[in-house]
Each structure stands twice: as C-alpha cells, then as structure tokens.
Image (cartoon, rainbow, N blue to C red):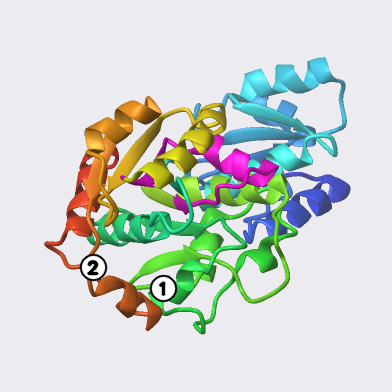
Amino acid sequence: MATTNERLLDDLLRLAAAASITPLVERDLHGLRRGWHTCPLVIVGDDLAAGLARTTPVRRTGVVLAGAGPGPDALYRHAFDVGAEAVFRLPADEVALAGRLVDTLDGGTRSAVTLAFVGGCGGAGATTTAAAVALFGNRRGLRTMLIDGDPLGGGIELALGIERDPGQRWPELLSASGRVSAAALRSALPTADGLPVLSWDRSDVTALPPETMRSVLNAAQCSNDLVVLDLPRRPDPAVEEAFVRATATLLVVPCDIRSLAAAKRLAGPLAEVAGDLRIIARASRRPAIPAADAATHLSLPLATTFADERDLPAAMDQGRFAPNPRGPLAQAATTLLDLFAPAA
C-alpha cells in the first residue's frame, strides 16, 4: 500500500491488521513503482494516483485505488489511468476493501462443492452420512471441511472423538459478521484425521445469526474443495442461509412408512430454499419400502442408498468413527463424491 496521506494510511493499516496482513508500506511514488511487480495486491492512495499515471505503469492485475480526496469523477479517471480494478472510497467502502484484503491472504477465491445433509426424521443418519462423506473426501485428497450446523444435535465432534481437542467452536465465532479469513478459519479448528471440523461446545448457545453463518461459509468455501454441512430439520434464518449456499442438499430418509411420512412434510418447505434436493435412502429394519419407490413418493431424485453397519454406532459412542472402507456407508460416500466432487 502506498500513500503520503497519514490518515488514509492509518485506515489502511487498521484494515490490514483486521485481515491478519502485515503490508509493505511505501510513502512515495518511487517506492510504489519499486514494488509494483512483486506484491499480489497494490493499494494506491488517491494522492499518488495522478503521479503514477504519468509514469505509464505496466498494466497488471491486483491494483486498486483507495481514498476520499478528489471527487468521484477524478477517482475513477485516475483508476482508469493506472489500470486499477476497483475504487474504494473510505470510509463507505471499508467492508469491501477488507474483503479484498482477505481474498489476497487466501490466495484468491475458489468455490467449494458444498453438500448439505439433513435427516428426513429423527435418527435418520444424516450426521453419520455427512461425517463419512467428509472423511472419505479428505482421504481422497480433496481439501475438505466438516461443519455441524445443528446446535441442538449431539455434536458431531463427539462421534469423531475430538470434543476435548483445542480449537475454535461456533460460540467463539458469534461476533463474525464481516469477512472471516479462510486460512485463519481452517487453522483455528480442531481436526479429526486431518479433517477440520467446526462444531459446538457445551455452552447455552442454541442459534446462530445468519450473518455469522454467511461469513463462516464464505471463508469455508474460499479455502476448500469440499464443504460438508450437517444441518437441522428446524428452519431458521441461519440454516436457510446454509441451504441456499449448498451445491446440493441430501435428505437422508429411512425407507419405512413412518419415516417417509415425516420426510414428506419436510421435503416441500426444504425444496423452497434448497436448489438441488435429492434423497439418500437408508435401508430400514421395519417393513421396508424400495428406495426407488421412496424417491417417487417424495418426488425427489435418488442420490444413493446405504444400509447400517452393525458395529459403527457403538464405535461412535466411544468416539471412534471408522466406517468399513468396503462397507455400505463408504460405498454411499464414494458414490456421492463421484457425483458431486470428483478427485482433483
């Protein structure tokens, strides 16, 4: 960042500190030109823009203009002259400029495949399926994050055996309403077999502001190839935010009459916020309905099916989540990964 305006520099340094960036600061045109080709992002103060334009700088990406000095017409004219990609008028555009700084720290933007899992009824197995897809996606070499979006659930980290591991949980992110650093989010979370997991602690927090969900999902989607969400059936603004942002929503439904009746009541409202809604049919111990018939009854496409693994529930109660690599859950996870997130 380059400017002779100390007040503007103070504002820029404050935004950089919030994004965990230590910038190279230049206070004259000579220094600005010296760092022109080497920095991933160049923030040019409006006070130096006219002088820079007269040097006819080589055009490059990653140049923005910041300031509040001259009128809008002059700012945009200077931006055109130096080849800036954007103009940020402070303080009005501080949030947008902070976002640009975070994107630079994260090495650019990416758009992760985001799969949301929700149970068609209580005990459907959505958490188990979500954890399996995240685990096998991570083992496949996809940069993956698992997010537990249900504050009233049992806590996905209990099943993974990481509830005592250090790292941030949702309550510590409640103040997030602007941009969350993608790199910082991944490094702050506890991990299970190398898989970053965002879950809940034992606090009394029972809901998230939609702004927090939006900020965290922005960061997760920018820093991963695959984001897996375990979401509750009850709708609220934060949960709806997650459904809207998902690449696909997978409704896990046991194939028996009572479970299908419960899922039928959920499928209609869910289809209003989930862009690509499909079902995962789970074999039922009750009088079973064929998976294809269950999908037809719900008027939804069938994504995959799976059957229970006898020893897995007891292992999860002990904090050991280890699906059989050749078992039905692993096969279902592989099918979903092949469908939505093929290996890089």
- Circles 1 and 2: CB atoms closer than 8 Å: no
Q: Position of residue 299 (x, y in %)?
A: 37, 25
Q: Which residue is mark 1?
A: 159
Which image quarter holds the C terminus? top left
Is 194 above or below relative to 180? below
Task: Tell me if residue 178 comes above or below residue 340 in the rendering.
Answer: below
Q: Mark 2 highlights which residue?
A: 323
Decide: is 248 above or below 12: above
Task: Give the vertical position of 23 relative to 316 (above or below).
Answer: above
Nearest the camera: 301 or 249?
Answer: 301
Sequence-earlier tag: 1 or 2? 1
Give the structural element (helix, strand or loop) at label 2: loop
Q: Residue 59's spot in the image, x, y percent?
A: 50, 26
| Residue farthest toward the left in the current orientation of the protein | 326
Region rendered in magenta: 229-255
The residue located at (31%, 54%) in the rendering is 133
Mark 1, residues whose alpha carbon is within 10 Å: few (<14), some, or many (≥20)? many
Spot occupied by residue 276 in the image (x, y as percentages of width and height) = 41, 29
Of residues 290 and 219, the one nearer the viewer is: 290
Q: Secondary structure at mark 1?
A: helix
In percent of width and height, residue 2 lies at: 70, 45
Label 1 is placed on what type of residue? Ala
Q: Is residue 249 magenta?
A: yes
185 left or right of 49 in image: left
The amino acid type found where label 2 is placed reads Pro
Tell me: 292 left or right of 158.
left
Q: Can you name the residue that lies furthest to the front here?
A: 287
Instruction: Give the residue at x 86% y 33%.
Output: 68
Q: Is residue 186 visible?
A: yes
Question: In the image, what residue occupies the spot 56% across and 45% down?
Answer: 218
Residue at left 41%, top 79%?
161
